[in-house]
């Protein structure tokens, strides 16, 4: 992949290549860090537009190099459940990798377009630092970010209803399900969203809307509160 950037922390590494305003990640290294048997094993559950391949030079000659797109990256990271890994050491290793991606890599990419964090990064990249300066956002603030970045005119109650349908929140409030609490933060009075989780939550929000939108409006939905029409968003639409 042209323009590949190496992200590493001494234990893990990711090879990422920018694509317009998005990116793709080489699958072999990602699969190893997530403890899959092979890249193809990791890619089995991804849609065609969430993965791809190209011919790349290697020490053994030109070979097929599989990659995941940005949505595919969020999906394989979020779907890898460490509780299902029997080997304790491997389970802990995958957990450390996920934590590194969520806590360091994604926030750095979103803020500065690069990794690791440096004081000069914002000036060098020339990007305005706004919401990313905060580690925690309220659900209302998250919707403001969504409108700013993607242009979708959705209110907070609708956003939370879709997240409940997607399995991230419990019914009847803004309380995350136990297995999804790592994406949220309890401030002592209510739950808020960790900023590094926004790309994944926005992706799941749009995917769930698109899955629900073809249903007839008088047909029961995954979530009882989804009562108004949904306008599916195309990837990259703003």
Image (spheres, rainbow, N blue to C red):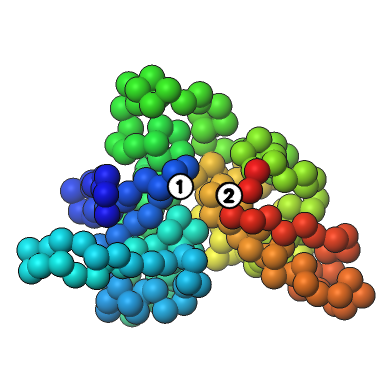
Q: Position of residue 159 (x, y in %)?
A: 74, 52
Q: In which quarter of the image is residue 103?
A: top left
Relative depth, front residue between 136 and 131:
131
Residue at x-position 92% and y-position 75%: 218
- Give left or right: position of 127 versus 26: right
Q: Do callouts 1 and 2 mark residues in contact (Cβ within 8 Å)?
A: yes
- Mark 1–mark 2 distance (CA, rounded to whole Å): 9 Å
Relative depth, front residue between 91 and 44:
44
Q: Determine which of the numbered discs, if any, sits on residue 183 in the image.
A: none
Q: Is mark 1 on a helix, strand or loop?
A: strand
Q: Where is residue 34 in the image (x, y as percent from the top left)?
A: 32, 67
- Residue furthest to the left in view is 59
Q: How many labels does the image show?
A: 2
- Give left or right: position of 227 versus 75: right
Residue 88 seen in the current view: no
User: In which quadrant will I find the N terminus?
Assistant: bottom left
The residue wearing badge 1 is 22
Q: Mark 1, residues whose alpha carbon is within 10 Å: few (<14), some, or many (≥20)?
A: few
Residue at x-position 27% and y-position 76%: 38
Q: In which quarter of the image is residue 114?
A: top left
Decide which of tag 1 and tag 2 comes sooner along the chain.
Answer: 1
Looking at the picture, does residue 3 appear above or below residue 61?
A: above
Residue at x-position 24% and y-position 65%: 55
Residue 97 seen in the current view: yes
Q: Position of residue 40 (x, y in %)?
A: 33, 77
Q: What element carries label 2?
A: loop
Q: Mark 2, residues whose alpha carbon is within 10 Å: few (<14), some, or many (≥20)?
A: few
The residue wearing badge 2 is 236
Relative depth, front residue between 117 and 96:
117
Q: Where is residue 199 in the image (x, y as percent from the top left)?
A: 54, 49
Residue at x-position 38% and y-position 55%: 24
Q: In which quarter of the image is residue 53?
A: bottom left
């Amino acid at each position: 992949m042209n323009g590949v950037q190496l992200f590493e922390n001494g234990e893990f590494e990711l090879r990422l290549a920018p694509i317009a305003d998005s990116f793709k990640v080489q699958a072999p290294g990602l699969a190893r860090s997530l403890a899959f048997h092979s890249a193809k094993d990791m890619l089995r559950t991804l849609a065609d537009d969430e993965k791809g391949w190209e011919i790349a030079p290697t020490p053994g000659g030109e070979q097929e190099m599989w990659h995941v797109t940005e949505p595919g990256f969020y999906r394989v990271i979020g779907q890898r459940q460490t509780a299902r890994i029997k080997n304790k050491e491997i389970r802990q290793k995958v957990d450390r990798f996920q934590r590194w991606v969520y806590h360091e890599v994604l926030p750095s990419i979103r803020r500065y377009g690069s990794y690791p964090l440096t004081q000069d990064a914002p000036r060098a990249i020339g990007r305005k630092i706004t919401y990313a300066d905060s580690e925690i956002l309220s659900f209302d603030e998250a919707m403001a970010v969504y409108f700013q970045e993607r242009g979708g005119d959705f209110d907070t109650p609708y956003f939370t209803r879709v997240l409940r349908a997607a399995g991230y929140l419990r019914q009847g409030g803004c309380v995350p399900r136990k297995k999804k609490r790592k994406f949220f933060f309890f401030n002592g009075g209510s739950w808020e969203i960790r900023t590094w989780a926004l790309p994944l939550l926005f992706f799941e929000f749009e995917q769930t809307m698109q899955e629900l939108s073809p249903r007839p409006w008088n047909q029961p939905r995954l979530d009882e509160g989804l009562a108004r029409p949904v306008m599916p968003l195309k990837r990259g639409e703003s």
